[in-house]
């Protein structure tokens, strides 16, 4: 049997769970429920070790709760590495736990460098690292990674090689979901197109040969849910790339906008929600006492899954 | 007394050491001398913990050796994070040790994200992180950081705030030192300029108000030594920004090219060499038995310092 690539495994998971939702595991101290904070402080003291254990437990309980409703989780590396080795410990444990539950994992790290350095990022996040007398699976290895393409081919090639060698996925940061004032993404080029469209055309060229069994490529882009009209353009440029779609929920993107970039087959994208789910206990329709944070994360995830599926149906794309 | 900012402290260090050299601490297993590899393997086994201890000791002995000749060190985070928590442990220890020796430290991480995530990167690399009942200095805190600007203001603003609050420095990845085929950097915009020049103009605008006592800004750019003609243009756009100049030495950039972006006062830049120094024992004029790796790293650093100073003198810029 041919080995399944990242996009093939996403398609299987979407069909099985009837969901296009991914949950961003972006732990911040201000999102942590009081009883877990007290436990971590009492057990480990006022230390980064305590924060690491706090994040690890919060993520584990969140994963258990949202598991039926999501196909993958996306830890944002910034929130872990800010606490140094103990933050990265929590990251490793979270990845390990998510995988043990059958979830796919994308690390949202937006790495971008050239030469040997790009190789080290590709090896570390998507493959194997050199060790005494050979290589071993990297302790931070996941199924897919987000990267920056500013540096060009010297950055892209090691990641492309990793995608082909390991059957993993890469998403190039292209049109993000942040404020409309994204000056570099939107600078107009000589051809009259904004930079993000020029980059999308490069991704279309770079990504050749990364197709999985389904025909979907394992070299895709980040396409913010907050710009539905741009998602249509993105899909035209990249007919069979996978889109990682942040900005749904807390950042203001609606479900109908989030699914614009999906293809008629109901595939080709995955929609992220982070604090709308992991911090659902703090405000909005699911607000509740801190002890029930995981329970309402599950409710928020179920709601988001259904919200997105309804949007797919309205768009005539619910074909799985 | 007014607090000195990052560029002020660099100026003091350059005057004191008569050097514009920075050493890239980019540990790779293939650069490690045999006796240290044996020690790490025998002591810690075939594990990421062993690699962490190997890198930490290699860096410590390298720092001790090159200390008289360099003003700062620049660990490249990719090589540490590929080994997870133990790699980051080595990173933390290296930073701590370099600071204890009076060296300035730039983390070459090329981070780039928006909103809360940019804030977490800025807090983690340049400031304080939230902990139980307040904040603490981050375990990965350094003096300056490299960042990607693709996302625009949502990414830039948290870093600018950190620069102003903590007196630290930021270098935006602009014109890198890798292959000439850096498609995105070089895409021509509507104005007829390449993207990297448009970005430089944005950096000039963004960086207002980040001047230290000397007048040099703490919000600069990466400007590869391999493109001396572009360095002149960069300096015209950014008259008082500091340039981080990689690509000298192993990547093929010569000393005369590397100092093109310096101002007449002999300041305004710092030139990086990584494997040309830390792996000098392996090939080239300083090749020697592995046991003498640190001794020849010192020789290579002394040579590079003198090589760069001679170039500054030839350019009429040796004015400190």
Image (cartoon, coloured by chain):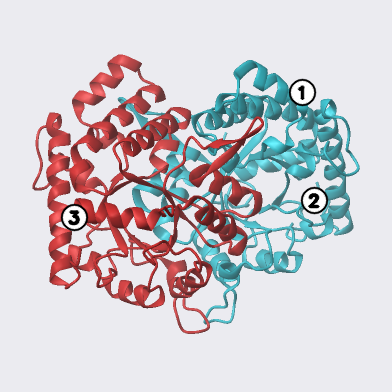
Chain colours: A cyan, B red
Disc 2 versus disc 1: nearer the observer: 1
Disc 1 versus disc 3: nearer the observer: 3
Q: CA distance from mark 2 to mark 1?
A: 26 Å
Chain at tag 2: A
To which residue does mark 1 refer? A35
Q: Residue at x 30, y 33 (%)?
A: B29
Disc 3 versus disc 2: nearer the observer: 3
On screen, residue B13 above or below B151: above
Circles 3 and 2 on the same chain: no
To which residue does mark 3 refer? B18
Identify the secondary structure beneath mark 1: helix
Query: Where residue A102 sits in the image (x, y, percent)?
Result: 67, 29
To which residue does mark 2 refer? A249
Tell me if A21 is positioned left or right of A40 in this view. right
Tell me if B292 is positioned left or right of A33 in this view. left
Query: Where residue B48 sits in the image (x, y, percent)?
Result: 40, 25
Nearer the N terminus, badge 2 or badge 1?
Answer: 1
Image-quadrant location for residue A40: top right
Query: Where residue B166 sits in the image (x, y, percent)?
Result: 50, 50
């Amino acid at each position: 049997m041919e080995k399944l690539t990242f996009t093939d495994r996403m398609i299987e998971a979407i069909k099985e769970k009837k969901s296009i939702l991914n949950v961003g595991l972006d732990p911040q101290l201000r999102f942590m429920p009081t009883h877990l904070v007290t436990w971590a402080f009492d057990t480990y003291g006022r230390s980064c070790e305590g924060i690491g254990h706090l994040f690890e437990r919060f993520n584990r309980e969140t994963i258990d709760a949202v598991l039926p409703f999501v196909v993958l989780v996306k830890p944002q590396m910034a929130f872990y590495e800010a606490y140094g080795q103990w933050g990265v410990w929590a990251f490793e444990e979270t990845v390990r736990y998510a995988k043990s539950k059958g979830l796919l994992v994308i690390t949202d790290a937006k790495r971008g460098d050239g030469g040997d350095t790009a190789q080290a990022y590709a090896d570390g996040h998507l493959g194997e690292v050199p060790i005494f007398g050979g290589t071993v699976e990297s302790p931070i290895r996941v199924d897919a990674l987000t990267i920056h393409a500013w540096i060009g081919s010297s950055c892209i090639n090691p990641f492309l090689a990793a995608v082909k060698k390991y059957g993993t996925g890469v998403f190039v940061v292209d049109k993000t979901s942040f404020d409309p004032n994204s000056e570099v993404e939107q600078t107009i080029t000589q051809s009259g197109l904004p930079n993000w469209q020029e980059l999308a055309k490069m991704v279309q060229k770079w990504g050749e040969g990364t197709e999985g069994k389904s025909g979907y490529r394992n070299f895709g882009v980040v396409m913010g849910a907050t710009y539905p009209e741009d998602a249509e353009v993105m899909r035209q440029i990249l007919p069979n790339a996978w889109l990682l779609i942040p900005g749904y929920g807390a950042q203001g993107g609606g479900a109908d906008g989030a699914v614009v970039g999906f293809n008629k087959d109901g595939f080709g994208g995955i929609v992220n929600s982070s604090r709308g789910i992991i911090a659902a206990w703090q405000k909005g329709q699911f607000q509740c006492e801190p002890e029930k944070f995981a329970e309402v994360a599950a409710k928020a995830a179920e709601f988001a899954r259904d919200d997105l599926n309804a949007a797919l149906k309205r768009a005539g794309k619910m074909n799985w």
